[in-house]
Amino acid sequence: MSLTWLERKTLARIQQRVGPSVVGPHGLLQPMADVLKLVTKEDVIPAAADRVLFWVAPVVVVVPAFMLWIVIPFASGLSVRTLELGLLYLIAVSGIGTVGLLMAGWTAASKYSLLGGFRAAAHLVSYEIPIIFVILSVGVLVQSLDLGHVISGHTVEVGGQILRMPDQNFVPFAAIMPLGLIVFFLAGLAEIGRTPFDIHHAESEVVGGPFVEYSGAHWAAFFLAEYMNTFLIAVLTVLLFFGGWSWPSPPTSWFGTDVPEWAVRTMGAAWFMFKAYLVTFAIFWIRGTYPRLRIDQLMAFGWQTLIPLSFVNLIIVAVVVYYHWPTWSMTLISLPFILLLWRIIGRRSRGIDAVSTVKLMDKSELEVTTLSDDLLVADPSGAATQNTEAR
Amino acid sequence: MKQRDTLDTRAAKGVPGRTVDMMINIGPQHPATHGVFRMVLTVDGERVIDAVPHIGYLHRGSEKLCEYEDYAQIITLFDRLDYVANFNNELVLVMAVEKLMGLEVPERAAYIRMLMCELNRITSHLLFIGTFALDTGAITPVLYNFRDRERIQALFESVSGARMMHNYFRVGGVKEDLPDQFNERLESALSEIEDGVDEVDRLLSTNEIFLERTKGVARIDGVSALDWGLSGPCLRASGVPYDVRTEEPYLLYERVDFGVPVGSQGDCWDRYYTRVLEVKESIRIVRQIMCQMAPGEVQTKTRRIVRPPQGEVYAHAENPRGDFGVYIVSKGNDSPYRLKVRPPSYCNLQALPQLVVGHYLADAIVVLGTLDIVLGEVDR
């Protein structure tokens, strides 16, 4: 809920507005008011809609969004359930929400929502692949699927050798796997359906896409799921790439005295949340800044750019881990690919002159062209020739 | 419960399934159609096969009303035609009547008219840039541009009393002189607007996503553009350097120096960027006017109710949207016998099917945005 307030305030400030400011101090109670309003609204179900599926679709979208939070550790050992297959669980459950969106688009019996549903299904499924590959790369790097190990590392025996897998206490994986970070963040933005990848509910075209026929609590459910997914991607980015509750890890001793366990965990969680909110803020910032990609461009970007790069990232990680090369070699090998990505998407860096096809012609260069003689009919009242008097 | 006619039931009956093209109705209530406009698109998946524009939702019978009102009242009607570029509409009407009467306006009045028209061009193009960015998905530039528009509209309010429907030009000049300290306020507004336009330009024009959405989309070449009757920035973006201010200079456009942006590709980006450059050129013109303007009279004495002699006249000018023209048939009375408006948006809109067919659904919205139509003008 706080995320809706944060997003509205952030967007408002970017747009030189104030944002919610009436309900509660600085509009902090606005999410409360929104929830109350949405829940008490009449549930309108279109006459031609399939009633059961129409009702079930938001559920199918919201439940996986909640389920994903079970495995996220907020501090060492502080997760609802510590699964050894945490990374795999994330990949598996995140795919279920797509089905819900497709259901919503189809059952609402409206062409707009159908189109939106098609677009959503196509693009969500395509962008799962880079996310999966990057998550796998992290798994390869840490030699474990446990989310806790991603941050605090662990020792593993590989071919008779005891190896200490990297942890993020001093070097976050963002420095080791920068390509992975970029691919994950972009694919994550696409997965949660945020600008520049929000074509499926582009307000200026399909006016809400698969959500257009939903009102009240159902609509609230969809948007709850979207915000939870947004925060989840932010949390995952921090967890996988920016050290989670580590980097630096919370102090276990304070001027000689041992800090109690609960305090260490709380500090870790607070630091984690702070970093996650920074990434969320970046996601809202991107929403306020960029236009959106068309569906075919979106798919092209996913399949032709992000997926190959995610493959490359996995291969780099696998090679470096297999040959026990130092981790900075991974950064070095990633750099050319990052430059390649920049070359693909960075037309602005070459300046307006490289891009512009419009010439500013001076008034003197424009003569009365032959157009007037051939194509314009002579003015019947002869008024066109009286053009030198001041009017 | 009645069994629904699904693909399964049809298959059971032996009716073969088939794919049909989908008819999508965009508007008249729609966030992106810039007014009450209805576009019926036939799409095959995401590709548009046919586009049929439906207009008339804003028809108010302006031309007929003109036959019952005298010329001073008609000025208010013209304000409301292209409700974004009010001064430009008023100008063409008063130019037509003055041409018919053979009336000359004082120099200061001509300068004031030019000043107001160029400022209105700036506001109109700022609105275009903002709403066009909104069509492509960028939600912020529209608010920056509206902030800049407010600066100019505050100036309009000080001059004419209204932010939008000014009723300021008169047959023979303008209603009254500019208020005190207008020049200082104008200069400070202009410098802030320059910064604002640069800001939005930097944000959008070279943005990779924006380029992907607009470059190469809905190209139209110069000859086709002329065939379809395009005018204004849409025509200039296709490479045809036709600007009424240079072809048939009216007011005092010969005395000011300005450039005219001409595109080469005729795609959406060109149509957008010509307007961005036109804003900068308009600012240049406004500064020159402020230097050249000298104190003087602002209105030629006429009858209170203007009665032009019998005759017919056509006058046109370069509106922000294109070539706006007015044809008046006068029988020597207080009201015209017949008044016909040549609205640029109406003529530009005819090219919509040509531009949109073969492109994606999302492009249809973008193309409609670049045509920059105002329904008040299209429907009158």
Image (spheres, coloured by chain):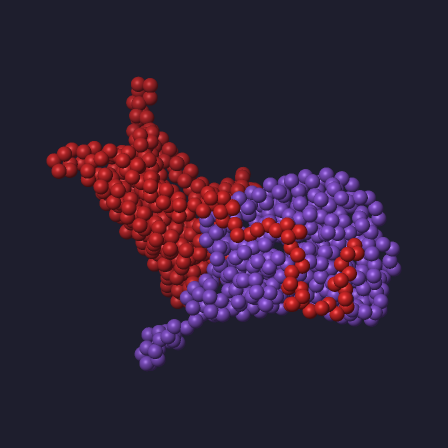
Residue A28 visible in the picture: yes
Say which chain is red: A
Vertical arrangement, residue B241 with respect to residue A320, above or below: below
Q: Residue at x 76, y 62 (%)?
A: A385
Q: Which chain is purple?
A: B
Which residue appears farthest toward the left when viewing the image? Answer: A160
Which quadrant of the structure image shows residue A338? top left
Q: Nearer the viewer, residue B276 or A93?
A: B276
Give whichever of A375, B210 is nearer the camera.
A375
With respect to residue A172, does A373 lie above or below? below
- Whole-percent x, y for residue A49 in the image: 42, 67
> Looking at the image, which is closer to me, A31 or A293?
A293
Q: Quadrant of residue A268?
A: top left
Q: Is residue B264 left or right of residue B295?
A: left
The image position of residue B75, as x and y in percent, is 76, 60
Q: Quadrant of the N terminus of chain A?
A: top left
Relative to B27, is B16 above or below?
below
Expressed as whole percent of the image width and height from the top left, the position of residue A291 reads: 48, 50
The answer to whether residue A221 is visible is no
Q: Is residue A261 left or right of residue B153?
A: left
Residue lying furthest top: A256
In the rendered image, residue B156, in percent from the top left (x then y), is placed at 72, 48
Residue shown at the point (81%, 64%) measured from the top left = B100
Residue occupying the point 30% across, 36% down = A332
The quadrant of the rendering that contains the C terminus of chain A is bottom right
Drawn side of residue B354 relative to residue B162, left or right? left
Residue at left offset 69%, top offset 47%: B257
